[in-house]
Image (tube, rainbow, N blue to C red):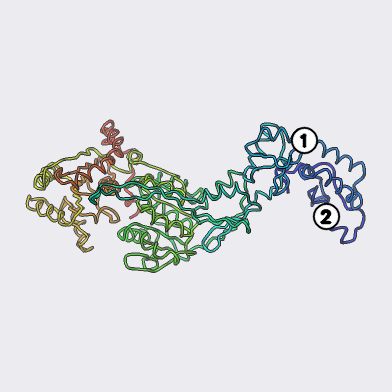
Amino acid sequence: MMSGSYELLNLVLRRKGSLDEARFRRFVELARRVAVFDPEHKVWRVSSSKLAVLSEGELEGLLVELLSLSALTAREAEELREIWRGLRANTVVVRGATLELLGNDVLLKEVLESFGQYLYSSDGAPRLKSLLYLARFAKEAEQKLGVRVFFDNRLLNVTLARVDGKLRWWFNALDEVLVSKLTELGTLKYFVERALLSSEGVYEGSELVERRLRVAHVSWREKCVTTPVALYQKYLDFLASEGFTVENKVEELPEVQIPLQKRFELLPHQEDAFKAWYRTRRGTIAIFTRGGKSFIALEAIYTLRKPTLILVTTKELLQTWLDYLERYLGVPKHSVGILGAGERKLGGITIATYTSAVKALDALKGRFEFVVFDEAHHVPATTFKSVALNVDAIYRMALSATPERRDRNEQLLYELCGNLVFKLTYDDLMRLRVVAPIERFESFFAEGKEEKLSTLVQLLRRYETSKVLVFTQYLTTAEEVYARLLKEGFKAELITGETPPLKRELAFKRFLEGRVNVLVTTTVLDEGVTVPDAEVAVIYEGTGEARQMIQRIGRVLGYQPGKTAKVFELVDILNPREKSAYLRRSWVRELYAEGMRYYRESAASLAESSTGYQRRMDYYLD
């Protein structure tokens, strides 16, 4: 079979009279070399592309036999010779896996001079440097010189299968250049963070060190390349771009036998994100905090109905996903597998923390066809890499508030989960009226603990009628702040990791009803726990992590007509740890800067108009 579509000639081949079985088989064998069978008329039609591939000696030998086995006449044989000579005048033939070029000498010399980047001369015969260049050379030769290139397109056929949790790509031929490129594709580059210490051993910061990991392995004997399933799309895209045709024999796992009931509707931006992801069923979706990323994953779970693994960063997020599955897809909690929070049970739909998944990689192999990487941009590169490379699910969705990672490993995320297919920033969500605009984002500096507490009290006095969240980092700080606020007469509640769930829900209820208007908390409410809407966020204490800052700000961005959010940082400049944390996260403010300018410019219309208003997701989901 040759490249390109067949150009069938008017010449046909028919067997001569009645042939015995051996002579008939020989006739069919010869006919296949130069013609295509026409089942409607039961004849073999001569193909110009097949004819062009034959050398002069091969053509003569074939004609001699066909004259005795077929109804071909001497005149028709001479006509075929003339057609062959005409084809060879403007045609180059690539001979099999040797990649040797055949044609008239003048034409071969011109082609060699014009395409030295793809060709070399061996013993006076031009050859392609690699199978990798075959399709590219054929296309450019016709475009630039008007020269047609014929070759057996089976050379560019690849067979793909999943074997023992890995992808195996079988080629019809391999060469050094092709293998080098395939190996390069299967070499991952990522960064790890290394601490910088002074000569006295004091921590002075960190630096990112590049690492490389080869995950593709070549068997020359089998003409096979083995890769992790994570690189499925990367190799498919590359091979397609170079003219290869992949016969995909990957057998997917059957659908889960869990009845799913869809109890939600996507908002327009979520629908757009889902459609963008569904085109390849792989990819990274970056929607800023409060944009409802989880519901896009729920839509995918409902649509695919494949065995699903949901990876989360914390046990709180694990519980949130467990609630989501039951509430929005009707999946009973007892039927959901859990890896983490002291449990180890696999199911058709399983939620796992990344750290627990790393410890159970063998158990996960062959169990899932769809994996959701939640908060993927925050997972340490080593942990993320281990899970993403060893879970052999074809379909993948990475959810992220922002595509950029602090450790610069976003490219690793894209390679193992799929490229960035959809992105919405805070500004985008604000214009869509999915999140509230930030009216004020200010930092206050105090000298010492007492001045800092007094500054907090003064600030809260200005917002006595607003609902306020005060975030701390440590339990002792939260208790000190809570005690001071009660002493100052504020209606406040304290929520920490030690607060029993029932008491926490009661505090939330009192906050919603307005019986208290200040919630003092530690890191327990940073993420993974559904928190009632508030208008003011006070970052009283925190790390330098941008992730934590963004999550905390997100707690006050729930949209309501006319609502604006206020964000305040309090920093004790006499405390080196607080100063360092403030400086490390200071760039986060820029994520909201454009939105704040937009708010100031259109504050009146935002307050007066509800056109395009989209209620918070839970409104639709109740």
Number of other residues with Cα within 10 Å of mark 2, as a class: few under 14, some 14 to 19, many 20 or more: some
**Can residue 449 be seen here?**
yes
* Mark carried by residue 368: none
Q: Amino acid at mark 2?
A: Val
User: In the rendering, at what x and y percent does residue 1 appear?
Assistant: 73, 49
Q: Is residue 248 left or right of residue 310?
A: right
How far apart are the alpha carbons under marks 2 and 1? 33 Å
**Residue 593, above or below 244:** above
Q: Secondary structure at mark 2?
A: helix
Image quadrant in which you'd find residue 586: top left
Q: Which residue is mark 1?
A: 105
Relative to 46, does residue 605 appear above or below in the rendering? above
Left-right relation of 476 to 187: left
Pointers 2 and 1 in contact (C-beta within 8 Å) = no
Label 2 sits on residue: 28
Please give the name of the residue rendered at 43% of the width and 53% of the height, measured from the top-left corner. Answer: 299
Q: Is residue 467 visible?
A: no
Judge the density around disc 1: few (<14), some (14-19), many (≥20) Cα neighbours within 10 Å.
few
Q: Which x, y percent locates residue 518? A: 16, 50
Residue nearest the viewer, comparing 171 with 478: 171
Dividing the picture into quadrants, the one containing residue 116 is top right
Mark 2 or 1: in front is 1
Q: Amino acid at mark 1?
A: Asp
Q: Percent from the top left, x then y, of residue 413?
A: 42, 49
Task: Give the secondary structure at mark 1.
Answer: helix
